[in-house]
Amino acid sequence: MQPIIAIEGLNKTYDSGFRALKDINLEIRRGETFALLGPNGAGKTTLIGIICGLINPTSGRVWADGHDIVRDFRAARSRIGLVPQELTTDSFETVWNTVSFSRGLFGSAPNPRHIEKVLRDLSLWEKRDARLIELSGGMKRRVLIAKALSHEPSILFLDEPTAGVDVDLRREMWNMVGGLRESGVTIILTTHYIEEAEEMADRVGVINHGEIILVEDKNTLMAKMGKRQLSLQLQAPLQHLPQGLSAAGLELLDDGHQLVYTFDAQHEPTGIADLLRQLNAHHIEFKDLHSSQSSLEDIFVDLVRARA
Ligand SMILES: Nc1ncnc2c1ncn2[C@@H]1O[C@H](COP(=O)(O)OP(=O)(O)OP(=O)(O)O)[C@@H](O)[C@H]1O
């Protein structure tokens, strides 16, 4: 199936000379929820801005639902809904007018029934005549989503959808995004909450210093999370691993004071019993041991740090 977004050889150098994106190649699948993760300044906003036609690329090409975002800008943009982080709309307008007006901006003919459906789906129907200034923060966020959905886009960008919202509202938004996904909308979200990516994404992409360093199925990443480590504090430091002990997953750290065994927690046997037997046979003694499990957050931090 044709990807809903195709990015080929995309580069962005700002006027300052700063290279914010370096040869990005990425395909987003129709109907998936894709989480774009990266530290501050990695290039997420630049990438989204280019796809949405807000920032000009330096080179490379992007297609949204088959339309070149530069040569066929209007058609490409009409396929895309963007939910920005901040509310930038006139706060004295009513919910209904704000959302209806947004549809008009994309040149779509008025469709009160669609607007009603969007407002009902987002539990905003009762508030349709309220002015934005009267709404809670959570309701205002829903209005941003309603605006982005007003022209019936097939691609929805959510930029930090739950930054600064409380746990209950975050959970509610996750459910809402799940509903949109079921209706067939492709969702691309940026987030600093790795848990959010775990909860919602089908695939995860990591961007760092303007480069995509990983694109992975979430379940595969979760399997990586299943890696566990057993750390042994040795009585006496080892220069190197003795012959026969160089099993996969064994590593000497801390100038030989620490032996770390990494294993897959989902597989039995873990190999720990065997390892302890071998240590005994080699008269390697340890004074302490502890086990730990790496989270997606750890994996993310490691990935980014390795490329710092
Ligand atoms: N107009 C600009 N001129 C020069 N440099 C810019 C401009 N806009 C962004 N940058 C730089 O490009 C880099 C990428 O910025 P971008 O906003 O895309 O990152 P981000 O991943 O969205 O970060 P954050 O998580 O903080 O929102 C940053 O180093 C930023 O300082």
Image (cartoon, rainbow, N blue to C red):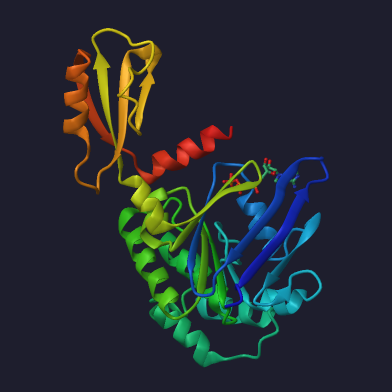
| Quadrant position of the C terminus in the picture | top right
How many numbered discs, if any? 0
Task: Give whichever of 293, 181 is nearer the camera.
Answer: 293
Task: Give whichever of 203, 58 is nearer the camera.
Answer: 203
| Image x and y of residue 95, in percent | 51, 76
Q: Is residue 95 left or right of residue 209?
A: left
Task: Give whichever of 293, 188 is nearer the camera.
Answer: 293
Residue 91, compared with residue 118, is above or below; it is: above
| Image x and y of residue 125, in percent | 41, 81
Q: Residue at x 22, y 15 (%)?
A: 282
| Image x and y of residue 242, in percent | 33, 17
Residue 157, compared with residue 262, is above or below; it is: below
Residue 114, compared with residue 217, is above or below; it is: below
Q: Quadrant of ligand 1?
A: top right
Q: Is residue 199 left or right of residue 115?
A: left
Picture quadrant where residue 179 is located: bottom left
| Quadrant position of the N terminus in the picture | bottom right
Q: Is residue 20 left or right of residue 140?
A: right
Task: Kindly give the residue lying farthest to the top in the view shown.
Answer: 236
| Image x and y of residue 243, in percent | 33, 20
Q: Residue at x 46, y 52 (%)?
A: 163
Q: Residue at x 83, y 45 (%)?
A: 15
Residue 196 visible in the shown view = no
Q: Residue at x 68, y 59 (%)?
A: 49
Residue 204 visible in the shown view = yes
